[in-house]
Each structure stands twice: as structure tokens, then as C-alpha cells.
Image (cartoon, coloured by chain):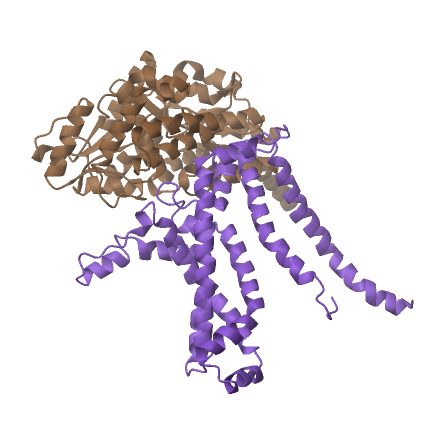
């Protein structure tokens, strides 16, 4: 092979290799280290005393962890479901060639530009019964109005859903809008000629064609749901008592505040498995060569 | 020209020598009153030629500071001194990162004047590793005098009288108990209630020795029942409220009492109130003669030889009687030495110092569970979980007792 051809093949690999090595060590290497720590008796600082599965046993005995996982299930399902639905509906409405589209689209995207800390703090003030929505509506004369979910142990997790959905649905909307724009107009015209009503058009033609976008949106939202830490801390700091604890806040609190690094590392490994369960099938389906396609 | 060069070199050399007399101090005393109190130490050391390099990490009762400290020590760049509470000091001592202050302690006679209950934290393996700065105590009640006078209430001496007083205040339309629904505040209440319900020996067995029988006993159930009773006296908006906002409820005559440590006194003083005239301070009914304490201490870390002299000077300055008096008058706490004069302290401070001396002599000076002086962080947080869940109605008292036993066992 000529020297030029060799360079052409090898240069990309050479350029990528430093990043590759760094990622290998600092991401995967430290993931492995966390896995090792989860099997040791680390308390305040890492230690190397092997204890096997004891930390995992302890973890699953903790009522606190149970709460965190339940909250993740509630929060995750609602967050992904509502964001996707809302994003899709908003995208479909925006796609109707309305007049103010150039203004409305960035307006819906603005919340995405805020960090979760800002979102959490702002919504903490909005939802506080003493100074937020309840107080304003009551001052308008509706003295019986009550909206104190954020102080209620059973409803506080739904306030986290509200804040998170507000932040991310604009982003999902933008993804769907891009997908809608990419649909070939000819197919839509053909369907309309065949007599499809608007609803049927969307239900049977458009939405199935958006399937890759659904998948992408799901992956992005799922990993954000599992990672949510700053939103919860800013909004409720774990909630009334521990009512809004999520695995991420649990992990931080057990590793650093409570000096139980072993249990914290175990919870981190469980979080990793959950994310892997979502991402790995997705990667597999993306990388698998489809018939007639060159990978 | 040569003369100038020589002069410049001499100045530079002397400045270089002074630069070694520097202490880098990590702490979380960032509010106005606390920073003012710390300035006393800075000026004291400045007068002795030691420069102070401040390293404040705000918030949270020290959580942020402890995380920063962990990073610094693991990177082999420990600060000269760090503010720490209770068991954290012992944990760091166990890591072998702390300096040996036995020389300073012997020269200054610390063993004789620092209460034994404090020494339990300041020393590791027989070596002094920390200099205590103050002693806060957590079993205080702060009351609005105007409300008490209006309703003709005297100082309650036991829990039933406390309940009567709270009922009267609530009936008169005020919020009976000003409280913030944060885990550590619920636990501060719990300290006092357990001490009042079971007495000194029960508190010691349950909270310090973590005896399973004591934790699962009927006395503990009664303590939880009393917590539930106190819950009925807080206002609807108590959840998540900061402690100083609860204090201002009492200051502004919106609420009758607050059960809080003596750092609350700073809020009252800052509002221009005087003990005995606008506000009353008394021990939680049933805990007279005992003190549940927490003590801020400066832990000295093992540093290079060049920094050791400054570190020794700082340790000496922290426990000097003049500094102890000046600092604690501003901070609201009580000196960590029993031989400091109480001339400069106000009425509540004087009472606090008398109570400390008595409790020290009678062996009723007990570490506060809520503030990390009875059990290590893991157990403390486990207790927080149960107490705050019970206070918010998640468990009945029986369930809470069972949960407490299980949680404490799991956290050890």
C-alpha cells in the first residue's frame, strides 16, 4: 500500500487515540475503580479491605434506597412520557406553517438554556405556598386555592417532574420539529390523495416515520432522568424528609456526607447498570448493519 | 547601587521569612456574626506576626467544607487548620493526617481546663490533635417574653407544663412552636426530648453507646410520642424553613417559643433584643442540670516544618482565655475552658457557662446526637432519617422505634 494510503487510513486513528486513551482511563478505568470500591469497606476515604457483596446487601435493605428507586420510576416514567408527548404535540402545531413560528420556536427552547440549578431554584420559589403560585392566586381573591405539593411528602416528586418537563420539553420539541421537516412532502401528498384525513395522516404516516426521533429522545431523556442531581437539590434538597431522593442524590449523600463510601459506590454501580440497560441495546441496534447498508 | 541591592535583598529575605509564618484555615463561618467572631482570632494572630490565609467554604453546617478538605488532604496539600465537629475529628485522626499538639497542650495546661467530654474529641490516641474554640449547647428554649407576660406563663419545668404553655400560646392565636422542618432541626428537638424523657443515663445508653435495648425501649417510644405532640404545635408552613427564620418568628412576636441551640441567641441580639427583657432563655423542661453540647474545634493538620511554628501559635491563641472570652461573647456560645471569667457575657451566656461547669462536674455533659457529637456521621444521618420521617407523619411511634433500631444497626 502506498505511503499516502497508509497515512489516510492511520491518521484518523492517530488523531483520535489520545482522546480514546484518556476516555479509557478516566471514564472506564474509574468506573471499574468504583466497582472495586463498592466491594470494599471504604467509609470516609477509599480503603482496600475486600468485603464482597455486603455493601449491596446493605444497600437493598435500606428503606432510603427503596424510596430513591421508586422515585426514579415515577419521575423517569412521567418525565420521559410527558416530555415526549408534549414535545411531539408542540412540534406538530409549530409545523403547521404558522405566522409566529420564528418567534415561538426559540421561546420554547429558552428553558433548555438554563442550568438545572436555576430551574430548580426558580421553581422552588414558584411552588412555595407562602410566596409562589398559591399566594398569588389567593391574593387574586380565590382564598380557597391550595397548591402546596412541594411541601407534601406524597406529591413532592411531582413538582420535580413539573420543573424537569418545563426544562426539557422545548428540546424534545426541537428534535421532533427537525424530524418533521425531514419528512418527504411527496409521501404526505400521496397519502392525502388516497383520502387520509388529517388525524389519520399523522397517526398512520407521520408518527411512524418519526420512530428514530422517538428513540433518540428516549435515550437522551432517560439518561438525564437517571443523572438528575442538581435539579432535585436546588428544588427540594431531597424533599420533605427524604420524599424526593433520587439515586444520584442518594449516592452523593452516602459517599460524602454520611461517610459510607462503600454503600455509595454500590448505588453508583446500580445506576450504571440501569443506564447500561438503556444505552447498550440502543447502541447495538444503531451499530448493527442493516440489510443493504454499509456500516 | 550595591548598597541598594543589598538593602532590597535584606528586605526580601525578611519578607520571605515572615511568609513562612502563615496559617491557612478552612472553615464555614461565613455569616456576619460568625465572621466578626473569627476576626478576633485573625487580629490576635496578626498581632503576633502570623498572617491568616482564609479559606471559607459556605454553607450547610460544613458539608461543603468537609468535601473540600477531603480533596485537599488526599492531594497532600492539607490546610494548616480546619474547623471540624465531633466525630469528623476522630475520623481524620484515624487517617493519620493530624498534627501532634501535645507540646502546646502541656505548655498551656489544656488537660486541666478543657472538659473531659470535649477532650474525647480533641484527642486521638492520647495525642491532642485539635483546639476547641467554643461549646454550643442544643437543649435551650428561646421564648418571646411579651407573649409569656401577656398570658401569665411561668418558666415550664417539665414536659406537661411545657404542653400547657404551648396550648395557652396556641389558643391565644400565636404559633406555639417556631420550627423549621429540616432534618437537623427535627433532630435537635429530638436531642432535648430524649434527654428529658429518659434522663442522662438513658440518653447516654441510647444515643452515645447505641445500645439496642435502649433504642428499642418504651422510653424511646414515649420520646417519639412527645415529638408527635410537639409536631401539633408548629405552623403549616414549617417545612424546609431555615432556623434563623424560625428565630425571627419569635423575635417578631409571631410565635411563642423556639427549641434551638444557643447560636439562636445571636439572632435575638442582632435584632437588638436583650435577654430577660424581650426574650427568655431556659433549658428544655426536664433537662435542667444536663447539657447536650457540640463544639467547634480547629483540627491542626500535619504540615511541613516551616509551618509548624505558626500552627503552634494558632493553637495556643485559640485556647487563650482572652480569645475564648472575646470570641464566645460574639458567637453566643460558651468558652471551651472552664477557667474563663464570665464578666463580659450576657445573662444567657452566664447561665450557659454555669450549666457547663455543673454538667462537667456531674458527668452530665453529653454530646449532641443531632450535631455529630454522640455518634459518627453514618449513625447520625440514620437517626435523622427516622426522626424526620416520624415528625412528618410517615411512621407511627412504634414503627419509628423499630426503624430506629434497624437504621442504627445498618449504619455501623
Query: Can you tell which quarter of the image residue B196 is in?
Result: top left
Marks counted in the figure total 0
Q: In this orientation, which residue lies closer to the viewer: B407 or A198?
A: A198
Residue at x-position 28% and y-position 35%: B264
Residue B20: x %, y % from top left: 57, 35
Would residue A291 appear left or right of A49 to someone viewing this image? Answer: right
Query: Residue A25 or B99: which is nearer the viewer?
Result: A25
- Near-viewer residue (B149 or A31): A31
Q: Identify whether A254 is placed above or below A293.
A: above
Q: Quadrant of residue A293?
A: bottom right
The x, y position of residue A64, in whole percent, is 44, 38
Q: Is residue B218 visible?
A: yes
Q: Give the answer, above or below, for where B87 lies relative to B232.
A: above
Residue B40 in view of the camera: no
Describe residue B21's horizontal placement relative to residue A135 as left or right. Answer: right
Residue occupying the point 30% across, 35% down: B391
Q: Quadrant of residue A294?
A: bottom right
Q: Is residue B401 above or below residue B61?
A: above
| Residue B311 drawn at (x, y percent) | 52, 29
Q: Position of residue B148 (x, y in %)?
A: 12, 33
Specify the colour of chain A: purple
Residue sitting farthest toward the bottom = A193
Residue A259 vs residue B257: left or right?
right
Chain B tint as drawn: brown
- Residue at 57% across / 38% down in the picture? A265
Task: Give the residue at the far front of this rendering.
Answer: A194
Amino acid at each position: 500500500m502506498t505511503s499516502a494510503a497508509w497515512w489516510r487510513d492511520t491518521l484518523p486513528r492517530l488523531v483520535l487515540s489520545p482522546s480514546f486513551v484518556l476516555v479509557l482511563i478516566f471514564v472506564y478505568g474509574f468506573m471499574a475503580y468504583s466497582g472495586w470500591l463498592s466491594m470494599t469497606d471504604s467509609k470516609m476515604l477509599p480503603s482496600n479491605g475486600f468485603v464482597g457483596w455486603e455493601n449491596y446487601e446493605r444497600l437493598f435493605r435500606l428503606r432510603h434506597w427503596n424510596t430513591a428507586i421508586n422515585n426514579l420510576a415515577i419521575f423517569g416514567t412521567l418525565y420521559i412520557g410527558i416530555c415526549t408527548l408534549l414535545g411531539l404535540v408542540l412540534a406538530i402545531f409549530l409545523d403547521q406553517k404558522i405566522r409566529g413560528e420564528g418567534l415561538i420556536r426559540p421561546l420554547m427552547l429558552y428553558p433548555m438554556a438554563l442550568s438545572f440549578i436555576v430551574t430548580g431554584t426558580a421553581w422552588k420559589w414558584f411552588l412555595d405556598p407562602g410566596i409562589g403560585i398559591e399566594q398569588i392566586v389567593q391574593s387574586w381573591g380565590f382564598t380557597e386555592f391550595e397548591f402546596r405539593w412541594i411541601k407534601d411528602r406524597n406529591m413532592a416528586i411531582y413538582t420535580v417532574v413539573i420543573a424537569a418537563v418545563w426544562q426539557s420539553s422545548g428540546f424534545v420539541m426541537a428534535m421532533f420539529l427537525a424530524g418533521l421537516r425531514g419528512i418527504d412532502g411527496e409521501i404526505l401528498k400521496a397519502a392525502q390523495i388516497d383520502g387520509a384525513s388529517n388525524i389519520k395522516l399523522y397517526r398512520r404516516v407521520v408518527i411512524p416515520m418519526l420512530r428514530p426521533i422517538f428513540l433518540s429522545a428516549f435515550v437522551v431523556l432517560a439518561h438525564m432522568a437517571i443523572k438528575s442531581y442538581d435539579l432535585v437539590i436546588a428544588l427540594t434538597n431531597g424533599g420533605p424528609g427524604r420524599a424526593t431522593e433520587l439515586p444520584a442524590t442518594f449516592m452523593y449523600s452516602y459517599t460524602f456526607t454520611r461517610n459510607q463510601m462503600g454503600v455509595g459506590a454500590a448505588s453508583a454501580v446500580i445506576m450504571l447498570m440501569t443506564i447500561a440497560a438503556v444505552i447498550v441495546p440502543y447502541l447495538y441496534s444503531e451499530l448493527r448493519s442493516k440489510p443493504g447498508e454499509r456500516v | 547601587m550595591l548598597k541598594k541591592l543589598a538593602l532590597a535583598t535584606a528586605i526580601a529575605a525578611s519578607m520571605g521569612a515572615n511568609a513562612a509564618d502563615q496559617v491557612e484555615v478552612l472553615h464555614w463561618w461565613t455569616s456576619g456574626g460568625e465572621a466578626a467572631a473569627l476576626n478576633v482570632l485573625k487580629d490576635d494572630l496578626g498581632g503576633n506576626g502570623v498572617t491568616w490565609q482564609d479559606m471559607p467554604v459556605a454553607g450547610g453546617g460544613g458539608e461543603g467544607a468537609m468535601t473540600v478538605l477531603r480533596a485537599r488532604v488526599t492531594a497532600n496539600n492539607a490546610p494548616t487548620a480546619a474547623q471540624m465537629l465531633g466525630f469528623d475529628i476522630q475520623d481524620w485522626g484515624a487517617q493519620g493526617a493530624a498534627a501532634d499538639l501535645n507540646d502546646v497542650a502541656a505548655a498551656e495546661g489544656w488537660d486541666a481546663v478543657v472538659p473531659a467530654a470535649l477532650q474525647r474529641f480533641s484527642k486521638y490516641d492520647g495525642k491532642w490533635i485539635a483546639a476547641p474554640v467554643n461549646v454550643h449547647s442544643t437543649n435551650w428554649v428561646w421564648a418571646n417574653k411579651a407573649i409569656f407576660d401577656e398570658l401569665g406563663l411561668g418558666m415550664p419545668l417539665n414536659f406537661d407544663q411545657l404542653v400547657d404553655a404551648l396550648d395557652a400560646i396556641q389558643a391565644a392565636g400565636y404559633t406555639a412552636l417556631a420550627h423549621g422542618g429540616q432534618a437537623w432541626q427535627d433532630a435537635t428537638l429530638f436531642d432535648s426530648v430524649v434527654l428529658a424523657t429518659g434522663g442522662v443515663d438513658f440518653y447516654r445508653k441510647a444515643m452515645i453507646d447505641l445500645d439496642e435495648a435502649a433504642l428499642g425501649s418504651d422510653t424511646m417510644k414515649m420520646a417519639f410520642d412527645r415529638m408527635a405532640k410537639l409536631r401539633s404545635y408548629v405552623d403549616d408552613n414549617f417545612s424546609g424553613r431555615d432556623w434563623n427564620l424560625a428565630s425571627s418568628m419569635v423575635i417578631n412576636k409571631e410565635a411563642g417559643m423556639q427549641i434551638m441551640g444557643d447560636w439562636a441567641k445571636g439572632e435575638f441580639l442582632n435584632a437588638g433584643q436583650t435577654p430577660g427583657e424581650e426574650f427568655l432563655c431556659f433549658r428544655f423542661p426536664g433537662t435542667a442540670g444536663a447539657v447536650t453540647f457540640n463544639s467547634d474545634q480547629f483540627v491542626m493538620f500535619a504540615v511541613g516544618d516551616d509551618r509548624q511554628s505558626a500552627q503552634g501559635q494558632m493553637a495556643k491563641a485559640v485556647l487563650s482565655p482572652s480569645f475564648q472570652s472575646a470570641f464566645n461573647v460574639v458567637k453566643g456560645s460558651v468558652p471551651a475552658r472552664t477557667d474563663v471569667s464570665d464578666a463580659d457575657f450576657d445573662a444567657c451566656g452566664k447561665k450557659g457557662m454555669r450549666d457547663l461547669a455543673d454538667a462537667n462536674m456531674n458527668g452530665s455533659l453529653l454530646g449532641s446526637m443531632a450535631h455529630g457529637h454522640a455518634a459518627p456521621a453514618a449513625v447520625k444521618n440514620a437517626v435523622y432519617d427516622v426522626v424526620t420521617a416520624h415528625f412528618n407523619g410517615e411512621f407511627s411511634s412504634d414503627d419509628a422505634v423499630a426503624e430506629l433500631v434497624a437504621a442504627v444497626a445498618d449504619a455501623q
